[in-house]
Amino acid sequence: MSITVFGSVNLDLTVSVDRMPEPGVTSHATGFLKGLGGKGANQAVAATKLAKGPVRFVAAVGADAFGDSLRASLDGLGVDTSDLVTMPEHDSGIALIHVDATSQNTITVVGGANMAWSSEGPDDRCFESCKVALFQLETPQDATIAAMRKARAAGATVILDPAPIASSGMDALLAEADIITPNETEAAGLSGIKPTSLEEALDVARSLCSRGPGTVIVKLGSKGLAYACKDGQGGVIASFKVDAIDTVAAGDSFNGGLAVALSEGMPLDAALRFASAAGALATTKKGASEAVPDRTAVDGLLSD
């Protein structure tokens, strides 16, 4: 059985700064990094590096030099690119990222080819023999909903990372998801309440279960996570203590790890610890896909 990731792929242009730029102020960066990014690509890389079975990545690039570079980067990381589509009339996606001295980040995305999918989404065959399908919101909403429905029809567990949070249409997306994984900002966008503690996150997770998903996982970064299920299961899981230097890939590594753990049949609490370990380790390196940990590293952290 396989994992399918449908989502975005971008060229990431990351600058390190002492503090975030203010309007009207020109400041000097302390570092620069160019690499593979996009929530879909990051999650596909994470799943590929962590999984014992096949991972399929469904995404779009432009007919440009960036597209060739992105395809080569994915190939170099072992990601299956046979379902990577070229959109000839569009540029490849780009993300402009600032990371400050406290490891916080801001990201501006130019969607390009990622936003060129038709309302029908990818072909049904992309979800054949799929056990877990992973989605984010850097592709058109109607295409994403269509893809989620195709995954569900194929018998897959559907995970939605509701990021970046949309200003409308979220109920239609939540209705197609088995699991959603918002962070505190996305949880606030969905519920109107921004949780600041695990207890508040658990309350928000329980309330969001009524919107459609069978399981809601609210991530609070270094504080840990809270989760709730429609069957009454739920609780909190503490974070792993690591020396964080860059949080860019943490959420994507978490989601890739969660997809892998569930595809291998781990119970939910064990799957959440596995995903949390993957997310924590991603913060110990700079970059997006470059920071994704492998299976040996995650297993090692779990055994400590």
Image: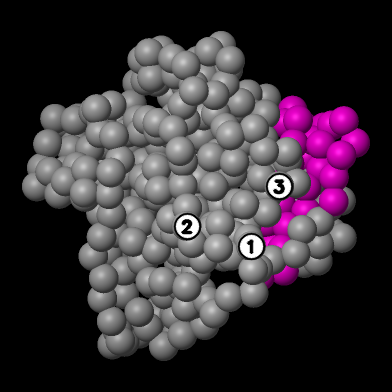
Residue that mark 3 sits on? 270
What's the residue type where badge 1 is placed? Ser
Q: Residues within 10 Å of mark 1 (few under 14, many from 20)?
A: few
Of callouts 3 and 1, which one flags the residue occurring earlier in the amino acid sequence?
A: 3
Residue 141 in sight from this viewpoint: no
Q: Residues within 10 Å of mark 3 (few under 14, many from 20)?
A: some
Residue 257 in sight from this viewpoint: yes
What's the residue at 38%, 13% (across, down)? 125
What's the residue type where badge 3 is placed? Ala
Disc on res. 303? 1
Q: Is residue 99 magenta?
A: no
Residue 124 coordinates in the image, percent (x, y): 41, 12
On the picture, is 258 further left or further right than 51? right
Q: Which residues are magenta?
A: 206-235
Farthest residue, direction right: 232
Residue that mark 2 sits on? 296
Disc on res. 142? none
Is 237 drawn above or below residue 2 in the view shown? below
Hey, which quadrant is residue 18 in on the image?
A: bottom left
Mark 3 vs mark 2, CA separation in Å: 17 Å
Mark 2 vs mark 1, CA separation in Å: 11 Å
On the picture, is 79 further left or further right than 269? left
Asked which secondary structure carries label 2, the reply is helix
